[in-house]
Amino acid sequence: MSRCPTLAKQPSHLFFGSVYALLAGSLILFPGCDTGNKSPVVVKEDAKAPAHTDDHDKSDHDHDHMDEDHSDEKSAQKADDGHSHEMPATVEAAIAQLKKVTGQVRQALKSGETDKADSLVHSIGHLMEDLNEKIAAAKIDEKVKDAATAASNKIFEAYGEIDEALHAAEDEIKKIDFGSFGPTINKATKNLEALLLEAKDAVVGEKPKKDDKKAAADKKAADKKAADKKAAD
């Protein structure tokens, strides 16, 4: 039985034929060093350069555009995250906000929306801190200041207990009942409202305004009296 010859015994023309084929392939893939062949290559590379630059510019533009969109998205999210710490300008607005958010906390806990309730409780914490600063800076009687501070602290402490409960174990969170805190919060809110509205000019630096209805009634009575006197004369 004949066998295929080994590499050492293969005919020389087959070996050199293979080498020739490899050399021919190399010449095809790598053109000769003739300077006349360089011009087309240079022109071809120059033609590609603008396209590469355009792609790079487009990439930069797209990157900038994405950054801009990302910034807008962050701004929108910031505007809607419900964590704004801007405080009310007046005592009336602060009390109104306190009552409103208290109602929202009650509803959120009733509905089992604990994350929402937690966010609302934090907002009340900032509100009460702001009110305490206003009370401390107010030029009012010390007894009134102490009473207002005590009422504010009761509200703050009650919501602190709610906040602590909201960060407890899941089983404990489910047991939270706003009714356990509501009476204390509502009573302290009413006391605080009465004290602060009475001294709102000192708390926010505003002068007390006259009762518009009373002023209108007094003017009407004065005009009527003058008219009656003129008719009698």
Image: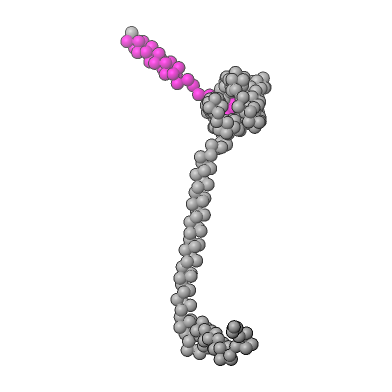
Identify the residue shown where x is 65% and y is 32%. 167
Whether residue 77 is situated above or below residue 141 in the rendered picture: below
Residue 113 seen in render: yes
Which of these two is toward me, 201 or 85?
85
Q: Give coordinates of residue 96: x percent, y percent.
A: 52, 26
Q: Whole-percent x and y of residue 166?
A: 62, 30
Against 91, residue 18 (above or below) is below
User: Is 146 or 223 nearer to us in this picture?
Assistant: 146
Q: Tell whether 145 sits left or right of 108.
A: right
Q: Say which quadrant the N terminus sits in.
A: bottom right
Where residue 40 sits: x, y (%)? 45, 83
Magenta span dominant secondary structure: helix
Q: Is residue 229 magenta?
A: yes
Relative height, residue 31 to residue 186 (above, below): below
Part of the protein shown in magenta = 202-231
What is the residue that sits farthest to the top in this orientation? 232
User: Is 8 contained in the magenta span?
Assistant: no
State the residue at coordinates (51%, 82%): 29
Q: Residue furthest front?
A: 1
Can residue 133 be seen from the camera position used here? no
Foreground: 146 or 217?
146
Of residues 219 and 26, the one nearer the viewer is 26
Q: Residue at x 45, y 17 (%)?
A: 214
